[in-house]
Image (cartoon, grey):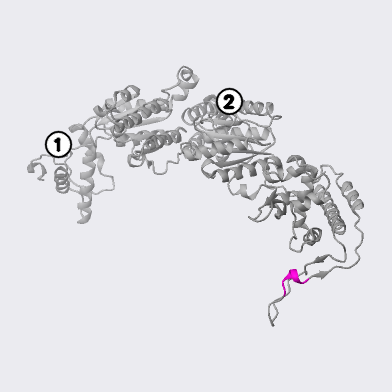
């Protein structure tokens, strides 16, 4: 049966049920009240008289006719039973089965739903109770009206009240049986045939959408394992939550989507920080979710990735999950690390991005139009540098047109860089790398080490994956380099050159934002930085690294202990980081020796000699800058670093622009005198005379 036909027949069943209920109420009123003595309120309130206050409604009886047609309850009941013979069954019957309602509870619900659908029910309730003020359903009316009444239906642990199917709020002086009953709006809509998510959940949860294509074998194996676990426990009262562990939220969502598609369920997400913190509010939300799980094929994904360290939110997560698993739905919990058991059954699954071989195969499919040598080379380069999910690779390939073929690998590389760019907010500053190898003036040994760093980054895929070095290593897969030397000798420029050559984004850690005076916050900030940088599309640059990587000290008080904990965390995290990290310092001796052992490269940046300074002076002025009669040999005798030379050249250019004249030796030497005085460097005045 299609949906339109089912809704039509459901409407017919509902109309027959309402007709039966009206007949039943009329019969009950006729049996309990003499026709000549029954009074009902006026249809509308009498307006206030201009001569004074009108009589209260209770003092203005309205007599009913002395004769009423005999109710036809048996005929209405037969018509209702006939209308119920539809496949699938009517919504009210489905609801009763899903929430395990007894016949009495189902009819009580019908009485409350009828108040929303039929305006005649209120008057009939008042007549049945013999009280004009009780024009609403009550448990007392239901207990008297329907067959096989059960007192336990009033219990807060029975479905009508536990699942919030009915709202009942007795006043302080009112008995529970006499309190007004009202059907929940979501339940009324369901009985009418409209099955949509409760709006109270819709404000907190977002649909995750369908699965995005086939998973790679490594992730599909995890999805199959979760399905098998849940299938084995589907007949029990409680299905254990699946805790998905790992740093990649996207990978966990993809696995959860695949599981839900396999089990024909819809996935909804909610952040742990969106959960209420008060126990009563958590309980109410959990019960609404449990009810929705019975009405819709749903699965919930609780994302603890963004607030995994908050004790209050973790407590709310544990309380909510312990109740959410006691339903017909299933629950995922996404977290970086294992959670402390919060009193709810669970199974943990480690979810990672696809392996490098799986990513390589996906890239080969994306570049199928290329000749095999170019395709294999491009796929190996991309899978060696970037760590992406297969859905991301397919999306990138779909966004990049195949033509022209010769630029396809480069276009895919640029899109990968954009896609994997981390959102570090204020924790790091993005540097636009503009310097090239031609701009860098260093010793031959320094240049050789820098070129070796670039070569290792470019060849990681071949060494780690195709040559299987990664199978023997569980740490140290990243590349860490220390740039050491005096300030202004080119350490930051060298980092820019590497980023420019590799066509990667360069991020400089903002120490003012990362380092916190609060215990544990620095580690959390660093964890977030490292986790976001794992995609491989960026280079991590720690300027003034001695501030973070300093030597551990003897523990004399709690401050020393927590400072050492920060260093210990960095030692562990640097060893498991898989990207390129560059540390720069002019105080190499201040670094903890444990860091030095973990460094792949130590690149010295020495103070430039006369030959290097001459080259720097020759390159410092752009070609468009007007200059005349510059003596580079004399300028090279000025004892300045590369940064100092750049500062002098810039100041000389401003002096020339102010007088609308070209840059001359006089202006350069004048700017050099200012620079030396600024640096408190000893120099003879003869050095600055043209």
**Residue 172 vs residue 406, the one in the foreground:** 172
Q: Dot 2: within a 10 Å radius of its alpha carbon, few (fewer than 14), some, or many (20 or more) residues?
A: some
**Which mark is on residue 337?**
none
Q: On the picture, is 279 further left or further right than 591?
A: right
Q: Is residue 196 above or below residue 474?
A: below
Q: Secondary structure at mark 1?
A: loop
* Residue 296 image offset from top left, x and y in percent: 70, 42
List x then y, in percent, for residue 461.
Answer: 47, 24
Q: Are marks 1 and 2 in contact (CB under 8 Å)?
A: no
Residue 12 visible here: yes
Residue positioned 37% across, 31% down in the render: 581
In-image side of 483 versus 262 (left or right): left
Quadrant assignment, res 644: top left
In the rendered image, residue 293, in percent from the top left (x then y), is placed at 67, 40
Left or right? Give the position of 583 relative to 648.
Answer: right
Label 2 sits on a secondary structure element that is helix
Return the mark for residue 637: 1
Quadrant position of the C terminus in the picture: top left
Residue 168 versus residue 569: which sits nearer the camera? Answer: 168
What is the quadrant of residue 442 in the picture? top left
Q: Which mark is residue 218?
A: 2
Between 127 and 534, the one lying in front of the other is: 127
Residue 546 % position (x, y): 28, 32
Task: Give the residue drawn at x 68%, y 77%.
Answer: 53
* Residue 89 as seen in the image, left or right of residue 255: right
Q: Which residues are magenta?
A: 55-60
- Does residue 468 belong to the magenta stretch? no
Visible residue check, residue 371: no
**Residues at marks 1 and 2, CA–CA distance in whole angstroms:** 62 Å
């Amino acid at each position: 049966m299609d949906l339109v036909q089912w809704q039509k027949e459901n409407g017919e069943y509902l109309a027959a049920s309402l007709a039966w209920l009206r007949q039943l109420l009329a019969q009950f009123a006729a049996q309990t009240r003499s026709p000549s003595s029954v009074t009902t309120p006026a249809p509308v309130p009498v307006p206030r008289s201009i001569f004074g206050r009108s009589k209260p409604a209770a003092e203005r009886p309205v007599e009913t006719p002395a004769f009423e047609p005999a109710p036809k309850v048996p005929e209405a009941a037969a018509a209702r039973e006939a209308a119920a013979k539809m496949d699938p069954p009517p919504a009210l019957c489905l609801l009763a089965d899903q929430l395990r309602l007894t016949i009495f509870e189902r009819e009580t619900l019908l009485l409350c739903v009828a108040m929303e659908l039929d305006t005649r029910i209120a008057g009939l309730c008042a007549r049945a109770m013999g009280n004009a003020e009780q024009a609403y359903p009550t448990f007392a009316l239901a207990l008297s009206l329907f067959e096989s009444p059960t007192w336990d239906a009033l219990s807060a642990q029975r479905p009508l009240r536990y699942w919030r199917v009915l709202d009942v709020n007795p006043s302080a002086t009112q008995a529970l049986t006499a309190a007004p009953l009202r059907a929940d709006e979501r339940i009324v809509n369901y009985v009418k045939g409209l099955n949509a998510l409760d709006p109270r959940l819709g404000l907190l949860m977002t649909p995750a959408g369908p699965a995005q294509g086939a998973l790679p074998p490594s992730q599909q194996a995890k999805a199959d394992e979760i399905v098998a676990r849940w299938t084995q426990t589907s007949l029990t009262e409680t299905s254990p939550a699946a805790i998905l562990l790992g740093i990649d939220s996207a990978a966990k969502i993809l696995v959860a989507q695949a599981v839900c598609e396999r089990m024909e369920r819809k996935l909804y997400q909610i952040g742990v920080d969106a959960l209420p913190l008060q126990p009563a509010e958590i309980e109410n939300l959990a019960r609404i979710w449990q009810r929705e799980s019975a009405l819709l094929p749903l699965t919930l994904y609780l994302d603890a990735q963004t607030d995994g360290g908050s004790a209050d939110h973790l407590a709310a997560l544990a309380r909510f999950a312990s109740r959410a698993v006691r339903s017909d739905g299933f629950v995922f919990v996404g977290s970086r690390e294992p959670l402390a058991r919060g009193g709810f059954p669970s199974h943990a699954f480690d979810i990672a991005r696809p392996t490098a071989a799986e990513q390589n195969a996906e890239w080969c499919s994306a570049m199928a139009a290329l000749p095999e040598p170019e395709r294999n080379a491009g796929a190996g380069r991309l899978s060696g540098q970037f760590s992406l999910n297969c859905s991301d690779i397919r999306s990138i390939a779909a966004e990049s047109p195949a033509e022209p073929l010769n630029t396809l690998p480069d276009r895919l590389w640029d899109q990968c860089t954009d896609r994997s760019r981390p959102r570090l907010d204020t924790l790091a500053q993005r540097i636009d790398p503009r310097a090239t190898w031609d701009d860098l003036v260093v010793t031959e040994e320094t240049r050789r080490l820098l070129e070796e760093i670039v070569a290792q980054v470019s060849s990681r895929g071949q060494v780690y994956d195709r040559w299987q070095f990664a199978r023997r290593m569980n740490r140290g897969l990243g590349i860490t380099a220390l740039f050491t030397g005096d300030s202004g000798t080119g350490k930051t420029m060298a980092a820019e050159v590497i980023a420019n050559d590799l066509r990667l984004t360069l991020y400089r850690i903002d120490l003012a934002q990362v380092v916190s005076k609060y215990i544990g916050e620095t580690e959390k900030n660093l964890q977030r930085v490292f986790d976001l940088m794992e995609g491989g599309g960026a280079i991590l640059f720690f300027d003034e690294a001695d501030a973070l990587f300093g030597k551990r000290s003897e523990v004399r008080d709690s401050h020393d202990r927590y400072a050492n904990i920060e260093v210990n965390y960095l030692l562990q995290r640097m060893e498991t980081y898989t990207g390129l990290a560059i540390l720069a310092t002019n105080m190499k001796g201040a670094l903890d020796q444990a860091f030095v052992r973990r460094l792949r490269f130590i690149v010295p940046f020495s103070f430039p000699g006369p030959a290097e300074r001459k080259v720097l002076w020759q390159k410092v002025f752009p070609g468009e800058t007007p200059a005349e009669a510059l003596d580079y040999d004399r300028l090279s005798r000025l004892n300045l670093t590369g940064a100092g030379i750049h500062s002098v050249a810039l100041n000389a250019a401003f002096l020339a622009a102010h007088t609308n004249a070209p840059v001359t030796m006089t202006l350069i030497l004048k700017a050099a005198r200012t620079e030396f005085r600024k640096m408190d460097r000893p120099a003879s005045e003869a050095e600055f005379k043209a």
